[in-house]
Image (cartoon, rainbow, N blue to C red):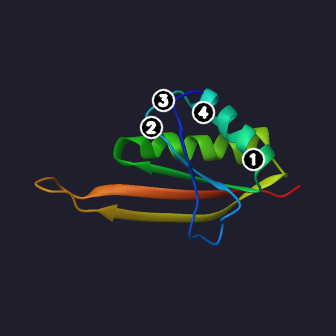
Amino acid sequence: MSGVEKIQLNNSPYAEGHVVTIYQQDIVPCALDILTDLVKYKTVTLVAKGHSIPTAVAVANVITENMMKGNSKILDIVVDSEETDDKPLLSIIKIVIMKTN
């Protein structure tokens, strides 16, 4: 595994998929891990915080525009932030990718 963390979705409209937390890591190995999940599940949600957000966006782009072009799409993108003690707001992104075929 390339360092992604997998968590089963509980209360979500995309409950048949997985939530995958993205960290700052190499893009292609991470995209291959997500591609493996898309073979098993219909949807995968990428979640990233702070400096890991560009990695999550790049992984989603590689999957939908290169690896599975025409066979996948981005269902939803949610941008949010959370407040932490004694620190500025931390940005969060959630990208839901669905396999179409």
Which label was assigned to residue 38? 1
Q: Name above or below for residue 26 compared with residue 23.
A: above
Disc 4/disc 1 C-alpha distance (Å) = 13 Å
Foreground residue among 98 and 61 = 98
- At horizontal 60% and vertical 33% (from top left) the residue drawn is 30
Sequence-wise, which precedes: disc 1 or disc 2? 2
> Where residue 3 sits: x, y (%)?
51, 30
> Where residue 88 sits: x, y (%)?
18, 55
Type of amino acid at the residue the image marks with label 4: Cys
Mark 4 residue element? helix
Q: Which is more foreground, mark 1 or mark 3?
A: 1
Disc 4/disc 3 C-alpha distance (Å) = 7 Å
Type of amino acid at the residue the image marks with label 3: Gln
What residue would you read off at disc 2?
Answer: 23
Mark 1 residue element? helix
What residue would you read off at disc 4?
Answer: 30
Type of amino acid at the residue the image marks with label 1: Leu
User: Where does the C terminus fall, quadrant-wise?
Assistant: bottom right
What residue would you read off at disc 3?
Answer: 25
Q: Is residue 101 left or right of residue 88?
A: right
